[in-house]
């Protein structure tokens, strides 16, 4: 099974996200992650869709998305030609000693501690999936109270045509 990440430029109108999600649902395609946001031009939004399947399924996904109303452009984001990032917020239960341990780990990974209380520390991580997974592995000995991941977002490297 392969994985692909697509950058989909769409008109910023109501119902676009629903049409894309319905396409995946109707054909039983899997969405591994989906992020959507307005672009530099408020008339457009950019969806970053990570999906997996065999090569034929992935080719069909790209073709079917391209045919949807309000879709302007579909681009495959490959690791060699793109920059991927993901955001994770994680709240870890800590005591005073553990707070220092977590701060040391955070320092090594260059992540931000965004909230501190007597009982917990909230950490913000931004990076590629392998960096985030490695950091979260180091937290396995601690009690994670809450965790949220945004999903992949990305852009092609270099000059825009």
Image: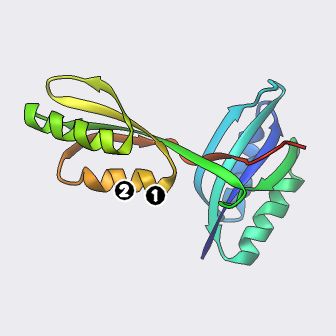
* Residue 136 x, y percent position in the rendering: 33, 51
12 or 134: nearer the eye?
134
* Quadrant (top left/top right/bottom left/bottom right) for the N terminus: bottom right
The residue indicated by pointer 2 is: 134
Q: Is mark 2 on a helix, strand or loop?
A: helix
* Quadrant (top left/top right/bottom left/bottom right) for the C terminus: top right
The residue indicated by pointer 1 is: 130
Disc 1, disc 2: CB below 8 Å?
Answer: yes
Query: On the picture, is 93 further left or further right than 122?
Result: left
Q: Residue at x 63, y 61 (%)?
A: 51
Q: What element carries label 1?
A: helix
Q: In this view, does 108 lie above or below 52?
A: above
Is the residue marked by circle 1 packed among few (<14), some (14-19), or many (20+) residues within 10 Å?
Answer: few
Quarter of the image holding residue 118? top left
Q: In this view, does 5 lie above or below 159?
A: below
Quarter of the image holding residue 109? top left
Query: On the picture, is 152 further left or further right than 147?
Result: right
* Residue 64 x, y percent position in the rendering: 83, 60
Residue 21's tag is none
158 or 72: nearer the eye?
158
Q: Is residue 99 above or below residue 28?
A: above
Quarter of the image holding residue 148? top left
Query: On the picture, is 47 further left or further right than 159?
Result: left
Q: In this view, does 75 lie above or below 117?
A: below
Q: Which residue is drawn at 86% across and 55% down?
A: 66
Q: Residue at x 76, y 63 (%)?
A: 61
Q: How far apart are marks 1 and 2 (CA)?
A: 6 Å
Query: On the picture, is 111 further left or further right than 159?
Result: left
* Residue 22 x, y percent position in the rendering: 71, 51
Is the residue marked by circle 2 packed among few (<14), some (14-19), or many (20+) residues within 10 Å?
Answer: few
98 or 42: nearer the eye?
98
């Amino acid at each position: 099974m392969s994985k692909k990440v697509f950058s989909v430029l769409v008109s910023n109108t109501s119902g676009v996200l629903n049409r894309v999600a319905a396409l995946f649902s109707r054909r039983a395609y899997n969405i591994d992650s989906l992020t959507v946001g307005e672009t530099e031009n408020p008339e457009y939004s950019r969806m970053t869709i990570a999906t997996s399947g065999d090569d034929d399924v992935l080719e069909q996904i790209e073709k079917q998305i391209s045919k949807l109303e309000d879709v302007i452009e579909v681009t495959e984001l490959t690791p060699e030609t793109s920059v991927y990032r993901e955001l994770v917020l994680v709240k870890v239960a800590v005591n005073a000693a553990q707070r220092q341990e977590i701060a040391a780990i955070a320092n090594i990974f260059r992540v931000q501690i965004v909230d501190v209380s007597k009982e917990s520390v909230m950490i913000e991580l931004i990076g590629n999936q392998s960096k985030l997974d490695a950091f979260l592995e180091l937290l396995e000995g601690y009690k994670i109270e809450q965790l949220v991941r945004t999903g992949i977002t990305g852009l092609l490297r270099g000059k825009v045509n």
